[in-house]
Amino acid sequence: MSEQPEVEEFAFQAEINQLMSLIVNTFYSNKEIFLRELISNASDAIDKIRYQSLTDPSLLDAEKELKIEIIPDKENNKLIIRDTGIGMTKADLVNNLGTIARSGTKNFMQAIQEGQDISMIGQFGVGFYSAYLVADSVTVITKHNDDEQYIWQSEAGGHFTIQRDTIHESLGRGTKIILTLKEDQSDFLSERTLKDLVKKHSQFIQYPIRLYTTKEEEVTDDEAVSEVKDKAEGEEEAKIEEVDEDEEKDKKKKKVEKHEWEELNKQKPLWLRNPSDVTKDEYNAFYKGITNDWEEPLAIKHFSVEGQLEFRAVLFVPKRAPFDMFEGKKKMNNVKLYVRRVFITDNCEELIPEWLGFIKGIVDSEDLPLNISRETLQQNKILKVIRKHIVKKALELFTEIAENKEDYDKFYEAFSKNLKFGIHDNDSQAKDKLAELLRYYTTTSGSEMSSLKDYITRMKEGQEDIYFICGDSKKAVES
């Protein structure tokens, strides 16, 4: 008789424990965002294994199909989200799901205390814990190519357990999250609700999201037997037979449950479509899906470049600056790089200059090699040309925003430091255009700001000089 695997218990790191307590004990009406967060994490996990498989195809041997599955189990009050992504090792489970707090944990709790909406949780890298908005207990079953299959389990009581999995069938590779729902959250087992949520938040995820559906059909005894036979023998040519109507009526009818997978996100990638065919709501849904932002973007630029090289892109300007915009350890940019619809990386420092790091979006190249490594990206000439086009289009977008004073005031308050950084960034391509976008207080402008160009038009006759003073704020220089 084989020994039962050891169950190890771990305490949540203090900040994570506070976060979970906040989620469990505070009332939020917008609980539905948990599904968006878990699907987004599943998509990221598939991105990682897909990228690794470009140089080592054998990494997909355990599970060839890249997919996300949603299984509502009404009988047991459980909702299951399964992916065939990279999976987690035991060390990943210990570190990522409990003992090492991300830099965003504290920032997120502070934002919530300041009145921000919980739907922003994904922006801070702690979206997994949103599962506790709807679940009393969460079980994670996971298999990484480099480790055995493990079970992580917690009821959010300050600790979690991990054990080697000798109970469940092998996943091959990937992760299965089982949510034991709270008594009042059973609506999230409804097929209609799940379909609506995927359409609302996750329809542009590039991997198939499949829902395990149950349908009830009324069939005669003969039809039920015939169905079983058809499944066993395969489809045959239709035959036309004469049937006695009275005999047909006498046949007993019964209800049979049918289960099938229904794909919920069949739309082709938004960036491949003609911009004139994409609605504002679709852009907003796509933006929220790739960024975990809870607000709509301030501005959008959707374009394609053809000629010596080809690529398509969708760029978004957020309404507000990210909390970690000038932190040294943060990612240098937020534009995802694809090559012929295959995700390559979401942290390509050569794709955009650092001062444009607040821009979010997608770039899909037709010309870069699929198996390009992060190292060779640094020397790639195609990438340098793409970068020039992105900077040019971003500047066009900022100029378009400036046409609406209210929008530009929001933009300038959030990102003026980035524009100034761009001028000092030795990027000769952008300096002149960026200078036109800067705004200044003047001795006569009061609380309004003015561009240098506007100021010059208001100069008095005979004025030859412009004097300026620098400081941290208007109040600082006035005193």
Image (cartoon, rainbow, N blue to C red):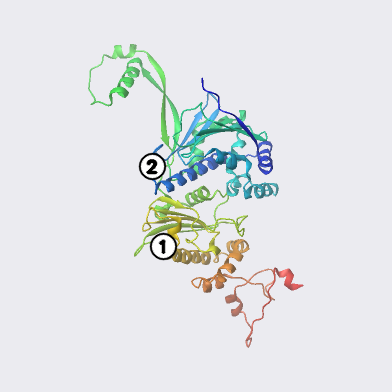
Mark 2 = which residue? 58
In the rendered image, the residue lying farthest to the bottom is 462
Q: Position of residue 218 (x, y in %)?
A: 39, 20
Q: Residues within 10 Å of mark 2 (few under 14, many from 20)?
A: few
Q: Is residue 399 above or below residue 12?
A: below
What SS does tag 2 mark? helix
Query: Disc 2 and disc 1: Cα gap in Å?
Result: 27 Å
Q: Amino acid at mark 1?
A: Asn
Q: Position of residue 269 (x, y in %)?
A: 41, 49
Front position in the image: 134 or 171: 171
Residue found 64% across the figure and 72% down from its top: 440
Q: Is residue 188 left or right of residue 60?
A: right
Front position in the image: 408 or 58: 58
Q: Is residue 240 above or below residue 153?
A: above
Q: Nearer the viewer, mark 2 or mark 1?
A: 2
Is residue 182 in sight in this rendering? yes
Mark 1 = which residue? 380
Is residue 32 in sight in this rendering? no
| Number of numbered discs overlaid on the protein picture | 2
Residue found 52% across the figure and 74% down from its top: 432
Q: Position of residue 82 (x, y in %)?
A: 48, 35
Mark nearer the N terminus (2 vs 1):
2
Residue found 50% across the figure and 66% down from its top: 395
Front position in the image: 16 or 321: 16
Front position in the image: 156 or 312: 156
Q: Position of residue 336 (x, y in %)?
A: 47, 54
What SS does tag 1 mark? loop
Q: Is residue 98 left or right of residue 196?
A: right
Q: Residues within 10 Å of mark 1 (few under 14, many from 20)?
A: few
Quadrant location, the C terminus: bottom right
Do residues under tags 2 and 1 come within 8 Å of each other at their CB atoms?
no
Q: Amino acid at mark 2?
A: Ser
